[in-house]
Image (cartoon, helix red, strand yellow):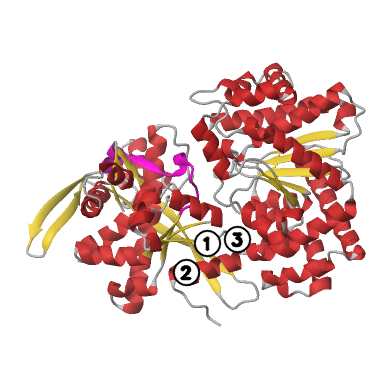
Amino acid sequence: MKFDGYIKERWTENGLVAEHMDAKIVEAQAYDMMVSGKDSEAVSVLRLWRAQNEHEFDMNSFSQGDYMRAMQEDTEAELISKVLYPSDNHYEGKSLRLKQQYFLVSASLQNILKDHLRRYGSLDTLPDMAAIHINDTHPALCIPELMRLLMDEHGYSWEKAWDIVTRTVAYTNHTVMSEALEKWNEDLISRRLPRIYSILKEINQRFCGEMWNRFPGDWDKIDRMSVFSHGQVRMANLSVIGSHKVNGVSALHSEIIKESVFKDFYDVWPDKFTNVTNGIAHRRWLCQSNPELCSLLSDCIGDGFVMAAEKLSAFKKFENDESVLKRLNEIKKIKKEQFCAYAKATEGVSLDPDSLFDVQAKRLHEYKRQLMNAMHVIALYNDLRENPDLPVQPRTFVFGAKAAPGYYFAKEIIKLIWSLGKDIEKNPKIAEKLRVVFMENYSVSMAEKMMPAAEISEQISQAGKEASGTGNMKFMINGALTVGTLDGANVEMQEACGAENIFIFGLTAEEVEELWKKGYNATEYYSRNPRLERVIDSLNRGFNGTSFSNIASYLVKGSPVADPYMCMADFGAYCDIHAKAEETYRDKMKWAKMSLNNIAAAGRFSADRSVREYAEKIWGLKRIK
């Protein structure tokens, strides 16, 4: 694939020819990882790519002592596949990310087309035999790159190439967060990818012309839909324009993108939009991660659920079987003890397996509201500092998260949680009833131990912000009870397990929207809630010798708006639902019954179902028996 340089266009008897001059050429080396199916003869191939310099090592420069020059081209090429998602809060990081995205897209597409031609002889049948899926906007450059390959390398006209592209490509949107709806500076794309830039301009010009005929005079609407706007290239808009299907990842999220983010596109192409709710690999997150629970399930309902997760629903008939409920509690204790041993070995902390394990494990982001969780912990800590003899249920709050490299406020929240935990440890009497641990280097391997041990699953994003979530499903299938907002897939989880088996609180997406329209004022909640006022005071005073006054200011007088994810507004309801959960937890058999109902209802959130829906609704694939 080619970077930098410039495009020289010339007319020939076969039409316009675009030549990429003075380009830096990078080669992609394929590495295959074999992935076998469960009890299946099928083996899938996950193709990985490594970037390398097209030219051989410059021995001439090396022999003359110019070692840096000899290595430079090799290093620049190899850098592309060295570290995925480098920090992009500076120009060089943005440039490298763009090169990574194009490199991976171009290598994969060239591979797909070469394979298709070898099998079928013509690219005319590509939409019938191949499905190319844009999973969020990172691979969105596949649209102009496929156009480039079809036109420049295989001689197709614009119209025929566009027809092939739009019947082959589909797009899954994973977020409504504006910063995650990827945008690139126009000048960066024009400099790094000049041929792709010219194709993007043509796609946009033709699309805007079509929209002008459809909505004459409505410049605002056309500007909202345009790929180019105010010096930026909007990849989400490109993804919708170039795809034959667009889906959200939960029922609520798919409605939100039709009503807000992509409303203008939905007005034009209502049939293009659909929903496929996320799913989890239950053979990993249940069968592999929790063999003790699997053994109980097999004893009760047989092992059919391993290949067909929907068969977990048969477990519900044991909801009043005391021996099964007792065994469920015993298994949870085993998983908690295993996690305690893991935490001791990796973090050097001693946790109490008899305490209530409350876990929030997910990417660190303001909208996911790890901060509100910490605020609740501070409130409990304040209560115990005032009266260490309070008769409360001992609780262990476990956090697992990573923040993006340049996301400094998220890192400040991590520091707060860690400092809060250290401060509590200095009060041994309080530490008997309240512990906080931030697990370092959160990973899949850690999650496999953490999720089966959890009793409360924190799914507390501001309503309307979480597209779906999958951690919520992983906790659910392991019997944790959800404390959550009506957001993302939590809505469907409540439908599945019943409102009596989940702890839902807080503002709904509609109420959040209404509150923004009226004018959200975080200080109103501060002045009305003495407990919340003490939390803010505690942040100003700090923990473990560090003041967190910047977080306090963010909540009550931030700019351009204080508390943008409404932690203050939901704090009272959040504390109330936790009090309800704590009261419920005292009745161990009731808790086990609720846990059982969650496990029994989790089958619909299997990735098997999710992939089946993609195959049927979007890719047009038939299952091989």
Query: Which residue is nearer to you in this view: 454 or 99?
Result: 454
> Mark 1 belongs to which amino acid?
Val
Query: Any magenta on residue 176?
Result: yes
Mark 3 residue element: loop
Q: Which residues are magenta?
A: 173-192
For numbered disc 2, what is the local secondary structure? helix
Amino acid type, residue under disc 2 in the picture: Lys
For the residue pair 343 and 355, the one nearer the viewer reads as: 355
Rounded to the nearest whole Å, what is the CA distance between mark 1 and mark 3? 9 Å
Residue 45 position (above or below residue 333): below
Q: Residues within 10 Å of mark 1 (few under 14, many from 20)?
A: many
Labelled pair 2, 1 in contact (Cβ < 8 Å):
yes
Asked whether, in this view, residue 244 is left or right of residue 231, the answer is right
- Residue 169 falls in image quadrant: bottom left
Measured Cα–Cα span from mark 2 to mark 1: 9 Å
Q: Which residue is mark 1?
A: 276
Tell me which residue sits at (89%, 46%) in the image. Answer: 586
Counting from the top left corner in percent of width and height, residue 41 is at 59, 78
Residue 42 visible in this rendered orientation of the protein: yes
Q: Determine whether 545 is above or below 63 in the image.
A: above
User: At 44% from the left edge and 36% from the top edge, which residue is drawn?
Assistant: 88
Say which quadrant the C terminus sits in.
Answer: bottom right
Where is residue 212? Give x, y as percent: 22, 50
Q: Nearer the viewer, residue 463 or 237?
A: 463
